[in-house]
Amino acid sequence: MMSATKRGETGRVRRLAVVTVAGALLATGVAAVPATAATRTADPGTSGLDRQALRQTLDAVHEAGMYGIYSEARDGGRTWEGASGVADVDTGRPVGPDMVHRVGSITKSFTSVAVLQQVARGTVELDAPVGRYLPGLIPGERGQRITVRMLLNHTSHIADYVGLVFPSLLQPSGQSLDDNRFRRFTAEDLVEPALAAPPTGEPGVLPGSYSNTNYVILGMLLQKVTGEDAQQYITRNVIRKAGLRHTSFPRTPHIPGPHSKAYESLYGFIDPPRDYSVYDMSWAGPAGAITSTMDDLNRFYRALLRGELIGAAQLAEMQKTVPVLVGGVAALDYGLGLYSLDLPCGRFWGHDGGVFGMITQSLSTPDGKRQISIGLNRAKYQRIDENGNLEPSPIDAAMVQHLLVALCGTSQATAKAAAPSFVPFPADRVTIKR
């Protein structure tokens, strides 16, 4: 969720990738340890899921340094769920596979579905200027050049607001996080400073530039065309339509239901890591405020990819990708609130998310048959070397192994060998000054 760019800075600014699953640089692999993960199998029958390898690779992520991880893998009607580690480092309370989790930018997929529902109804045109629906919001010629599609696929080049409302992240320091823990942001609080900041490029120019501001504006657009608060509309027409029972936009700073604490490390600049599980998520809104479970995320993407939430024409639009830079460094093949990722065993669709203290990844085959959703309760766990570059973490390589075993059905040894050449490009980045 944290894509931030601060302009007009003097001195050296390092653009650093925040690793959601694999890491910008991978270690050569981490050997699995004996399985101690708490797991539950929905169907004990034989399937393409290697349950033993899943347990071992899940536990290896915890042993590599992640406080707690929960994961659900699916292959057709077969399901495997597991959790390893602790939800609270002070009490030792264990994590569980059904814990509710802040999913960050995965929220963008939900918001995009809501917008595409309006496209299907004829109330919104993808290639119409934003100024048609929100006159005056984007000043001058930009309001007529930036289209709804450009907001959805991050080619608007509107600056991201995160570094503007949490400026200490760029120092780096957690002071802004503490100062704003209970602040209630409005959409205008987020959008106005971003629109006042220099754009990252001309509207529509490729590559795009990942910006949370786009999806806050899309929330404003949804409210304008539906006459209903965007989060309420998404809840009623996307979350409930998908049959999700543990997914919501929380109304308070608390995570609803059983959950882990959320530990933020900020690359070692918050040491020891600080818990931000109690936090007003109005700063993220339709760009990243949803909480969910790993099971619900798999259900959501399965319903989306099978055409149960939007029609075939809208899904085809959602899967038209363009190159998008994240934090100015890594390129994503980004569609409309959805990105594709090519693994050794084929193409997968999904999204990832990172908020203060929590990281999430969800990926599915195009038919929604093979899936994994993963939640982590410690964010930005990597360290930065003296040159301002990310140091590879054993957690990154361990995560790659677990993800490959889940999605590709490979043996643990094969996944370990494949890890160094497999680098997912997560959407969560932050730029810091060192």
Image: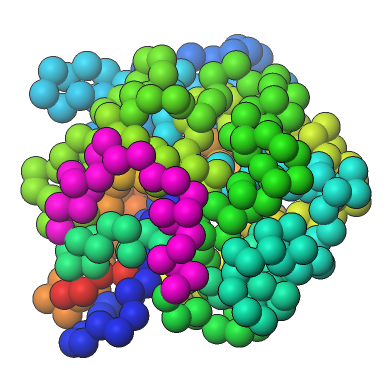
Q: Position of residue 236 (x, y in %)?
A: 69, 25
Q: Main secondary structure of the magenta part?
A: helix
**Left or right of residue 72, residue 172 in this image:** left
Per the image, is 175 magenta?
Answer: yes
Q: Position of residue 264 (x, y in %)?
A: 23, 44
Query: Is 170 situated above or below 260?
Result: below
**Residue 38 visible to the viewer:** yes
**Residue 24 visible to the viewer:** no
15 and 409: which one is in front? 15
Query: Is 324 situated above or below 203?
Result: above
**Left or right of residue 199, residue 36 in this image:** left
Query: Is 232 situated above or below 110?
Result: above
120 and 34: which one is in front? 120
Query: Is 110 situated above or below 160?
Result: above
Give the quarter of the figure containing the C terminus.
bottom left
Q: Residue at x 44, y 73 (%)?
A: 196
227 and 310: which one is in front? 227
Per the image, is 408 magenta?
Answer: no
Q: Position of residue 287 (x, y in %)?
A: 52, 48
Q: Position of residue 341 (x, y in %)?
A: 62, 58
**Left or right of residue 49, residue 290 in this image:** left
**Left or right of residue 225, residue 119 in this image:** right
Q: Residue at x 90, y 43 (%)?
A: 121
Q: Image quadrant of residue 73?
A: top right
132 and 178: which one is in front? 132
Q: Residue at x 76, y 45 (%)?
A: 225
Q: Residue at x 67, y 81 (%)?
A: 141
The magenta stretch spans which residues? 173-196
Asked which colour scheme the image uses, the reply is rainbow
